[in-house]
Amino acid sequence: MPLKQPRFLARQSYRRRRMADAARLLPLLGVFLVFLPILWRPAQSSEADTAGGGVYLFTVWLVLIAAALFLSRLLSAPPSQDASGDEEPR
């Protein structure tokens, strides 16, 4: 009986590809989150409501930096073969 190829990708390879996909989508998420305040309704007061928007933008900026750092660390690590041995065969 011939050996069959696995139907699915190895777990480690699959996870790395999904992390790469997340890294590709991070700029799009950032653009969406940065432009989201445009949709906010202005406050009922006559004065400009910039403090809340500034805090929001600074928070989004920090979260995007942290997410990019996290994803870059995960993707720069060499692929490891875990104990189950489900890394792609050579």
Image: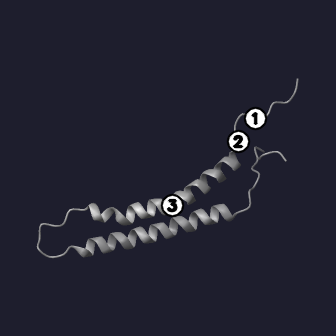
Residue 41: quarter of image: bottom left
- Residue drawn 75% across and 35% down? 6
> Which of the image's four quarters has the N terminus?
top right
State whether residue 37 is above or below residue 2: below
- Residue type at tag 2: Leu
Q: Is residue 17 above or below residue 65?
A: above
Q: Which residue is mark 1?
A: 6
Q: Is residue 42 above or below residue 14?
A: below
Question: Is residue 89 found left or right of 17 in the rendered image?
Answer: right
Residue lying furthest right: 1
Structural distance between the alpha carbons of marks 3 and 2:
24 Å
Q: Secondary structure at mark 2?
A: loop
Is the C-beta separation of discs 1 and 2 under 8 Å? Answer: yes
Q: Which residue is mark 3?
A: 26
Which image quarter: residue 21?
bottom right
In the rendered image, which residue does mark 2 sit on?
9
